[in-house]
Amino acid sequence: MVSVKVLILFLSFIIYIGMSALVDARSTAKTSPIARSLKSKQRRCEKSSACHGLHDEHLQNCILKCASEYCYELIYAKDPVSGSCHNGAESQGALV
C-alpha cells in the first residue's frame, strides 16, 4: 500500500513539473507574426533605392513611409520623426 502512495505522489510531482514547464513556455514572449512581417518590410525598405543614401531621421521617415504609407500618413505625416524619441503617442494625444 505504501508503494501505491509513493507512486501517486511521484506521478503528481511529474505532472506538476510538466504543467510548470508548459506555463513557462507559454509566458515566454515571442515576436508576433505581424511584428516579424513589419520588421521584414522595414529591412527591405532600408535597402530600397527610395531610401538609399539617406541618414538619421530622413532614413527613419523613409523606412516608416515605405513600410506602410497608410500608417505613416496616419501617425507621422503631421509630425515626422525628428532627432528626438518619438513613439507616435505625442501626435495622437496619448490616451492615458
Image (cartoon, helix red, strand yellow):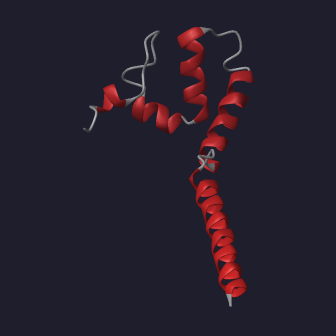
Quadrant location of residue 96? top left
Along the viewing direction, whichever of 50 and 82 lies nearer the viewer: 82
Along the viewing direction, whichever of 20 and 51 lies nearer the viewer: 20
Residue under the image location 41 percent in, 35 percent down: 74
Q: Is 11 left, or right, of 66 in this rendering?
A: right
Q: Is 94 left, or right, of 19 in this rendering?
A: left
Coordinates of residue 45 in the picture (x, y in percent): 68, 27
- Is 28 situated above or below 15? above
Coordinates of residue 66 in the picture (x, y in percent): 61, 30
Residue at far bottom of view: 1
- Is 47 situated above or below 12? above
Coordinates of residue 81 in the picture (x, y in percent): 46, 18
Along the viewing direction, whichever of 35 and 41 lies nearer the viewer: 35
Residue at far front of view: 2
Quadrant location of residue 53? top right
Coordinates of residue 36 in the picture (x, y in percent): 66, 42
Image quadrant where one finds the N terminus: bottom right
Q: Is 35 left, or right, of 70 in this rendering?
A: right
Quadrant location of residue 41? top right
The count of marks equals 0
Along the viewing direction, whichever of 4 and 95 lies nearer the viewer: 4
Residue under the image location 28 percent in, 33 percent down: 94
Residue under the image location 55 percent in, 27 percent down: 64
Q: Is 81 left, or right, of 41 in this rendering?
A: left
